[in-house]
Amino acid sequence: MAKAAPREEPGRVDKGIHLFVEDGYRPEYWMHLAVPENAQLLDLDQYLRDIWLECCLHLSSFFVGRAEYKYQIFEMDDFLAAFGDRELDSMEVELALVAPPGARFSYWYDYGTTTELRLRSLGKVAADRSGRISLLARNDAPANDCSMCGAPATWVGPAEDDWIAMTAGLCDNCALASEYRLPVVNSPRCGVCAYDGIPLHIVEDDDPN
Ligand SMILES: [Zn+2]
Ligand SMILES: [Zn+2]
């Protein structure tokens, strides 16, 4: 079990939301987060992408009750035109407004090879004074053995019956024989799409030329 941060310490203020996040299908992947009260869904989306999900800038959505808060890379008008009269909102809304203590909601990253998360607002907790989301605790990496030789797996490759998600563990040696492989990462997106655990950000080109 991973470490938990104390509730009171310098730099923290008692103005955060204690959020529990777990994978929708593999509850061995979970996190406890302290989210500043004024953080937006957009901030939470970025945090989840950075720590667990981002492979190639897929779309994402939070589903809260009947509302869908969608990651906006296009203008909202274009979205409304594309999705008809479905209720769609921007992620530029405060988490505290849409997810009061006790609220349960869900999140999708990538509408193709989707990683689906469940979230629960557990109440108040001290949050980082800087306004950043902080990690209170997370699961230890699940054990994963090489499907060829039984040694500890450092890679995953395609299983015989499933070429979409790579679920067969591979050790360093056996991985050499596999054309397709992804690194083992402590994330519910391990083995999915191109996920390698390295946060991906769009680099702004600030070269004046
Ligand atoms: Zn991807
Ligand atoms: Zn092996």
Image (cartoon, helix red, strand yellow):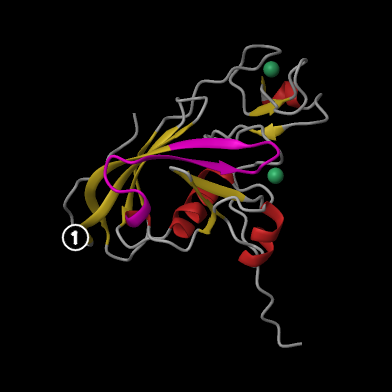
Does the segment drawn in magenta span residue 106? yes
Question: Can residue 170 be seen in the rendering of this structure?
Answer: no
**Side of 122 relative to 80 (left or right):** left
Question: Can residue 199 be seen in the rendering of this structure?
Answer: yes
Q: Choose between 145 and 131: the one closer to the eye.
A: 131
Q: Is residue 5 above or below residue 183?
A: below
- Looking at the rendering, the quadrant in which ligand 2 lies is top right
Does the segment drawn in magenta span residue 165? no
**Where residue 29 appears, x then y in whole percent?**
46, 30
Crowding around mark 1 (Cα neighbors within 10 Å: few <14, some 14 to 19, many 20+) is few
Q: Choose between 148 and 85: the one closer to the eye.
A: 85
**Where residue 104 appears, x then y in whole percent?**
37, 38
Q: Is residue 14 above or below residue 66?
A: below
**Side of 46 relative to 3 (left or right):** right
Residue drawn at 70 percent across, 34 percent down:
182
Q: Residue furthest bottom?
A: 208
Q: Residue furthest left?
A: 8
Pointer 1 residue: 10
**Side of 133 relative to 43 (left or right):** left
Span highlighted in magenta in the image = 97-118
**Where residue 80 appears, x then y in whole percent?**
64, 59
Residue drawn at 35 percent across, 48 percent down:
99
Identify the amino acid type marked 1.
Pro
Q: Choose between 55 and 87: the one closer to the eye.
A: 87
Quarter occupied by residue 39: bottom left
Q: Choose between 126 and 101: the one closer to the eye.
A: 101
